[in-house]
Image (tube, rainbow, N blue to C red):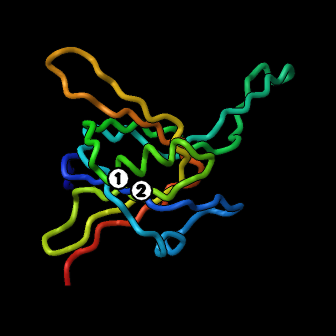
Amino acid sequence: MTIYATNGAKLFIGGVLASKSTDFVEADFTAQSWVEIGEVEALGSVGDTSTEITFDSITANRTRRLKGTRNAGAMEVVAGIDYGDAGQIALLAAEKTIHDYAFKLELNDAPEGGTPSERYFIAKVGTAVEALETANNVMKLNATLWVNSNVVKVDAAPGI
């Protein structure tokens, strides 16, 4: 079994991509032009969870649980502020709109000579705020991506 570190992962923002009534697939993202978001320190988490629906049965004296709608969560991204970084500029611009944007996460898990795993999804940029904490800290851009789709997982592939 092999495990991998988060360091070396990259986050990219694409263009506006509308939601749809079915799950996204990798091909839905092929027309995107990607811009890397620079100086990322933390990527947060992303992935589906189901809403719990409960029913308290009097006769069975038992709470029954069902799965409800799926929610891919909110990805909390932290980056060191770089006013000239094209990806951060695009992220700030996306926060000002009502649209969903395409995102790509490239992991640092490529086998020797191969390609890394990727994750694709759409999200609204819900927040983009500056954190200007204490004297011995880097000024940071904290962005929240409200994920509005399934997360398409593409596995790492070996080299040929």
Q: Which residue is disc 2 drawn over? A: 13
- Picture quarter containing residue 51? top right
Neighbor class of circle 1 (other Cα within 10 Å; few <14, some 14-19, many 20+) is many
- Mark 2: amino acid: Ile
Between circles 1 and 2, the one closer to the viewer is 1
Determine the secondary structure under disc 1. helix
Q: At which x and y percent is residue 69?
A: 69, 43
Determine the secondary structure under disc 2. strand
Say which residue appears at 28% left-offset and 73% top-offset.
Answer: 157
Outermost residue toward the front in this view: 84
88 relative position to 28: left or right: left
Q: At which x and y percent is residue 73?
A: 53, 39
24 relative position to 32: left or right: right
Q: Earlier in the sequence, mark 1 or mark 2?
A: 2
- Mark 1: amino acid: Gly
Q: At which x and y percent is residue 9?
A: 25, 52
Quadrant, the N terminus: bottom left
Say which residue appears at 73% left-offset and 32% top-offset.
Answer: 53
Q: Which residue is disc 1 drawn over? A: 87
Neighbor class of circle 2 (other Cα within 10 Å; few <14, some 14-19, many 20+) is many
Is 14 located above or below residue 69 in the figure?
below
| Disc number placed over residue 112 in the picture, else none | none
Instruction: Evaluate if marks 1 and 2 touch, with contact meaning CB atoms under 8 Å apart.
Output: yes
Say which residue appears at 73% left-offset and 24% top-offset.
Answer: 63
